[in-house]
Amino acid sequence: MKTLKYDEIGYWSEVKLDIIKDYVAAYTTVMAGQKKARFQYIYIDAFAGAGQHVSKRTGEFVPGSPVNALNIPQPFLEYHFIDINDLKVAGLEAASREHKNVFLYNGDFNKIILDDVFPRARYEDYKRAICNLDPYGLHLDWSIIKKAGEMKSVEIFLNFPIMDINMNVLKHDKEKVDDEQVSRMNRFWGDESWRQFGYAESLQGNMFGETEYEKVTNEQFEQAFRKRLKEVAGFNFVPEPMPMRNSNNAVVYYLYFATQSVTGEKIIKDIFKKHAQRQDA
């Protein structure tokens, strides 16, 4: 019989959870304070997990983003938690059974969000949503990001898995990237334009005078994706993402926030600034 094994998370994953918790609390406070507005707001977690994790630092349980969202003072109208692991969904069910407004999904989040969840957050229905997109790697379909931007009612947190990209896609020798990895990147980015942003023409060339290309820096590539979130997905505000690191201080992913709201941008900038100072902890 299979038993649930809780994910172990590092220091920076705990920081990310605190960032999202702080923003969700601020968001619902602002929304609840708009007495004349008819907005109703929902919370979506596409990689919800089991509701809690185990800290690598302390060995203690750490509440996951779904549980943090459930425990804020100003509740959401609905909570939508998705995970492909049936044991984790069962854990979520146990963690949320006292809440009648929780919807649990076991399956492919790409299909579930587009077919079942986003239709409940339509702008014209005076609905608004926060969607946490927290893939472990290049598992996300660009169509979800694009749809969220088009809807004008959905804000997103998004992990940009730069370590996965560097290891499997943006190799120094472009010829060594296999077709499966290219397909994963195309799906996440939305097309093959990542190639033009991932490599830059070398200033030196080679000994035969032929043009050569070299891999861009992490910062250059994440800026290209930030621009894509604004110009292609259609989000009005995409602040500088926050780098999330591992125990060796290497950037594992960038945490993006994208919104149509200038207020949301201001709030997350303050939160990013506060938690970035924890790098010296």
Image (cartoon, rainbow, N blue to C red):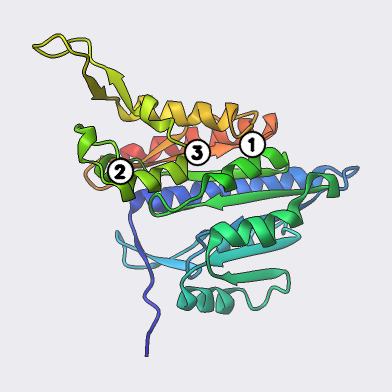
Between 147 and 187, the residue placed more toward the observer is 187
Lower position in the chain sequence, tag 3 or tag 2: 2
Spot occupied by residue 128 in the image (x, y as percentages of width and height): 74, 48
In this picture, is 121 found above or below 193? below
Spot occupied by residue 35 in the image (x, y as percentages of width and height): 88, 45
Q: Which residue is mark 3?
A: 256
Q: Is residue 71 visible?
A: no
- Tell me how far mark 3 sits from mark 1, CA to CA: 10 Å
Q: Which residue: 31% across, 47% down?
A: 179
In this picture, is 182 found above or below 71? above
Classify mark 3: helix, strand or loop. strand
- Tell me how far mark 3 sits from mark 2, CA to CA: 15 Å
Spot occupied by residue 101 in the image (x, y as percentages of width and height): 73, 69
Q: Which residue is mark 2?
A: 163
Between 40 and 87, the residue placed more toward the observer is 87
- Tell me how far mark 2 sits from mark 1, CA to CA: 25 Å
The amino acid type found where label 3 is placed reads Tyr
Looking at the rendering, which quadrant does residue 72 occupy?
A: bottom right
Lower position in the chain sequence, tag 2 or tag 1: 2
Between 137 and 115, the residue placed more toward the observer is 115
Spot occupied by residue 195 in the image (x, y as percentages of width and height): 36, 30
The amino acid type found where label 1 is placed reads Thr
In this picture, is 177 found above or below 40? above
Please indicate whether residue 124 sits to the left or right of residue 28 in the image: right
Comparing marks 3 and 2, which lies closer to the viewer?
A: 2
Q: Which residue: 59% across, 60% down?
A: 111
The amino acid type found where label 2 is placed reads Met
Residue at the far bottom in the pictured view: 1
Q: Which residue is mark 1?
A: 259
Q: Which residue: 24% across, 21% down?
A: 213
Looking at the rendering, which quadrant does residue 112 occupy?
A: bottom right
